[in-house]
Image (tube, helix red, strand yellow):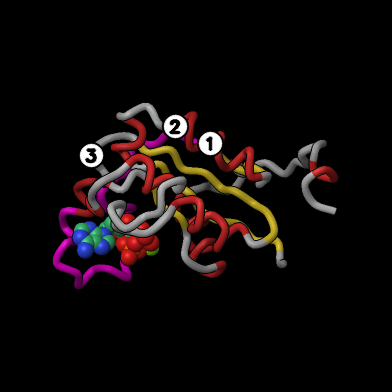
Amino acid sequence: QAVERSYIMIKPDGVQRGLVGEIITRFEQKGFSLKGLKLFQAPKELAEEHYTELQEKPFYPELVKYIVSGPVVGMVWEGPGVIASARKLIGATNPLNAEPGTIRGDFGIQSGRNVIHGSDSPENGEREIALWFKEGELVEWTRTIKPWIIE
Ligand code: DAT
Ligand code: MG
């Protein structure tokens, strides 16, 4: 599996509900490496750009309003196959369809309050990381436990 990076973002509802620690724990325990982390009030333009592919959807204006309605926690997680794996940990877009044990399955009810974002492809991962993080905000480091997670 290729080493990838995913942009993972705890949305304003996740921050307000006190799920930041719980969510970070799931990614840490899975074994991925945290390469960037910040609490951030997104400006409208950034939220619009992040979801630019959904511009024509009827829910787009509400979606942008939701993302800027409070601080988000933006993260970069790295590891083999992290893009698809993170989306499994996160669960289906509609939390009512998300399996129990996934983040959305455990903590949500509606698509419009689905707690967390995860990149859907390596290309979008890199695009989103460049959008949300400045040069120098990411940290290059190696988890000393790594040989016990990845052979
Ligand atoms: P995902 O976040 O699972 O990648 P997506 O990229 O299709 O889903 O959509 C981005 C976000 O837009 C999603 O997390 C919540 C919102 N959304 C998607 N479909 C929706 C719908 N039918 N009604 C309301 N919000 C929706
Ligand atoms: Mg998406």
Say which of 132 and 23 sits in front. Answer: 23
Say which of 102 and 125 sits in front. Answer: 102
Task: Tell me which amino acid carries mark 2.
Answer: Val
Q: Ligand 1 is located in which of the four quadrants?
A: bottom left
Residue ID at (51%, 47%): 133
Boundaries of the magenta span: 38-62
Residue neighbourhood size for the residue with mark 3, other residues' Cα within 10 Å, grouped as few (<14), some (14–19), many (≥20): some
Q: Which residue is mark 1?
A: 24
Which quadrant of the view contains residue 93?
Answer: bottom left
Q: Is residue 60 above or below residue 30?
A: below
Q: Which residue is mark 2?
A: 20
Q: Which is more foreground, mark 1 or mark 3? A: 1
At mark 2, the secondary structure is helix
Q: Is residue 63 left or right of residue 9?
A: left
Mark closest to the chain's N terminus, 1 or 3 = 1
Task: Tell me which amino acid carries mark 3.
Answer: Ser
Residue neighbourhood size for the residue with mark 2, other residues' Cα within 10 Å, grouped as few (<14), some (14–19), many (≥20): some
Disc 1 CB within 8 Å of nearest ligand 1 atom: no
At mark 3, the secondary structure is loop
Separation of marks 2 and 3 at Cα, in angstroms: 16 Å
Q: Is residue 66 magenta?
A: no
Residue neighbourhood size for the residue with mark 1, other residues' Cα within 10 Å, grouped as few (<14), some (14–19), many (≥20): some
Residue 48 visible, this angle: no
Separation of marks 2 and 1 at Cα, in angstroms: 6 Å
